[in-house]
Amino acid sequence: MDEQKVISKKDTLERMGISYGQLYRWKRKGLIPESWFIRRSTFTGQETFFPEEKILARIERIVSLKENCSLDQLAARITEKVDKKLEVAFSKLRELGWLDKELMEPRGVGDEEGSVALERAFSLGVLHEVSAAGRKEEIGLVKRTLDLALADSLVERVREQRSLLHLLRKHVGATGISAEISIVVIAPGGATFDPDLESVHVVDLAVVLDKIKLNLIKEEK
């Protein structure tokens, strides 16, 4: 259920046209999480790998942003400012296709001319990811689960540890009776579940939060 495609450090540097020094300088600044540096044994010895989708998107974004601000400014933008209750502009949400009316109304979001608090933007992003695979009642279950988790410092936990939201289904039955139960679980990466559970969709919560950090923060006037 929890397998992600990886790319080697060598291939990352060649593909993105950056140097070893740049990569580790960004790591020291906190622009690339330590947890993304995955050490694995290969026939040539120990090598470093990264989650492919995440690292390529992050490097592309860093390269584009560092033209307008220093690494220190960029690091501060990703950490200190995001730790506060920031507002995300609706224009940014619209660019990512997160402004789905059916998803916005349950989140108490309606005025596209304004902005939305960080946690609501995060919730909208997660719901958007699930909406293509989940049924209407399951989207409601995801929303309720997110509400409880956000009230219990979910965003802070996602920053510290890779967490995944799993939408699961289980078929149960007895003589002449059958039913299907939907389950939503937020768990650390690597969690295992009952093999009888069907994995409908998995959302990497850190990916959603990263999109807010690097793409959605409302620029200060």
Image: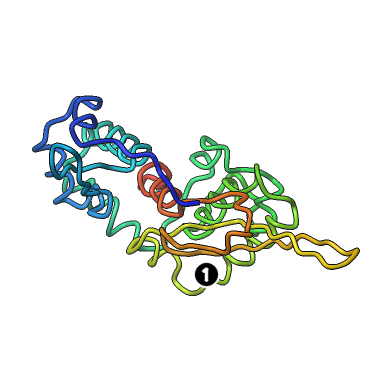
Residue that sits furthest to the left in the current view: 21
- Front in this rendered view, residue 42 or 216: 42
Q: Is residue 117 visible?
A: yes
Q: Is residue 221 visible?
A: no
Percent position (x, y) of residue 147?
Answer: 58, 67
| In the image: residue 174, left or right of residue 54 | right
- Front in this rendered view, residue 33 or 66: 33
Q: Is residue 206 above or below residue 55?
A: below
Percent position (x, y) of residue 51?
Answer: 33, 43
| In the image: residue 102, left or right of residue 81 | right
Percent position (x, y) of residue 35?
Answer: 27, 54
| In the image: residue 117, left or right of residue 221 | right
Residue located at (57% from left, 72% from top)? 148
Which quarter of the figure is the C terminus placed in? top left
Residue located at (17% from left, 38% from top)? 43
Q: Can you identify the residue that label 1 sits on?
A: 149
Percent position (x, y) of residue 50?
Answer: 28, 42
Q: In terms of secondary structure, where does tag 1 sit? A: helix
The three-letter code of the residue at mark 1 reads Ala
Q: How many tags in the picture?
A: 1
Q: How is the image coloured?
A: rainbow
